Amino acid sequence: MNVIVANRYQSMLEGLQIDVIKSLNGEYDADEIVSQFQNFFYQRMILDITAIKNYQDIRNLQKLSISLDMSKVILLLDDSPESSSPVYLSKLISMGIYNFTRNLDGIMYLYNNPNSYRDVAQYQQLDNFTTEVNNPNQPMAMRGQPANVAMQMTRIIGVKNITESSGATTLIYILKKHLEKNYNEGIVEVNKRDFMYFKEKDVFSADEGSVSSVINNHRDKEVLLVDVNDSKTALSQCTDVIYLIEPSVIKLNRLMLTNPHILSSLAGKKVVLNQSLLSSKDVLDFEYESRINIFYNMPALNEREKEVPVVDSFLLKLGFERQGNNANN
């Protein structure tokens, strides 16, 4: 089911031939929209940009990109000079807002064929982008910095199993092997020594007491992949965290018996179905039943393969733009 947030273009959006579970009409603060839909399940949100108060200030769009899954949002732009400017569109793309259009046909196309970064990359002006990064979930060193500065800092990507043995270690190894073609990367493993079996270089071990210093000592890397295991300290150091669920019946039932409220705690986070055999329809059903949005549906992978396009597509969705050529190939 879908939601519509409309204002100036309400009459246009009433003509959409889609199922609507909730509709708002009027002008709202970005924080009001976030509070309404951050924990609300929907397949697509059709968002009239004029429904956002002071949408000309790109920071109000940034509030949405921080708290909502923008891959499910279709932004209907108006014809104002602000939202029509190349700089404005470039900033939208830099915040992960790829689905924008100005007419009904465009909405229906994006509804069925959502854009990825490579579909809109030609609109991005990297040399001029200086929007501030104010994501409260980022480390203190990145807050309030110009985005072109923040992007040069180390990205610390944590990976955590939610269902038991969901494949975090193997997935991190595969991600590293793909990233090393385009990035200076490394791995930090906390409270375990499982990576010794891969015989991989640039793997740094840490325990709960030393993880902060180990991460800080390797900020010369562009990317650090962190196998956080049970470490709360490691989680606090990450710029982004991927939560893995293996969606087999036995794993899910065991998880729900252990912690019945765990899925609700994952609302708004990057949840990846790993080692998954689910179809696209199965994923939609899973989202509806669990009331959480799935960031990616990752099939079972062969760690011996050197090039796996689905892995590069996943990395591209995470914002590793240099993987784009690998994903296309």
Image (cartoon, rainbow, N blue to C red):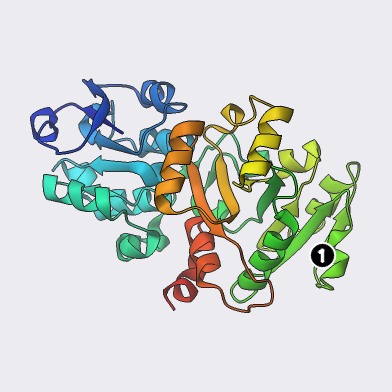
Name the residue at 81% across, 40% down: 231
User: Which of the two residues, 94 or 127, is positioned nearer the viewer here?
Assistant: 94
Q: Is 227 on the left-hand or right-hand side of 104?
A: right
Residue 221, percent from left and from top: 71, 63
In the displayed structure, would residue 214 be above or below residue 255?
A: below
Q: How many marks?
A: 1
Residue 285, percent from left and from top: 43, 40
In the displayed structure, would residue 148 be above or below residue 65?
A: below
Dividing the picture into quarters, in which one does residue 122 lie?
A: bottom left
Image quarter (top left, top right, bottom left or bottom right) of the C terminus: bottom left
In the displayed structure, would residue 264 be above or below residue 101?
A: above
Q: Amino acid at mark 1?
A: Val
Name the residue at 12% across, 32% down: 9
Q: Which residue is mark 1?
A: 203
Dividing the picture into quarters, in which one does residue 180 lie?
A: bottom right
Residue 11, percent from left and from top: 8, 29
Name the residue at 54% across, 56% down: 277
Residue 26, percent from left and from top: 21, 20
User: Which of the two residues, 291 or 140, is positioned nearer the viewer here?
Assistant: 291
Q: Is 9 on the left-hand or right-hand side of 130?
A: left
Residue 131 in sight in this render: no
Name the residue at 78% across, 36% down: 232
Q: Residues within 10 Å of mark 1 (few under 14, many from 20)?
A: some
User: Which of the two residues, 171 or 245, is positioned nearer the viewer here?
Assistant: 245
Dividing the picture into quarters, in which one does residue 50 lie?
A: top left
Residue 130 in sight in this render: yes
Under circle 1, the secondary element is strand
Q: Is 295 on the left-hand or right-hand side of 71?
A: right
In the displayed structure, would residue 167 be above or below residue 327?
A: above
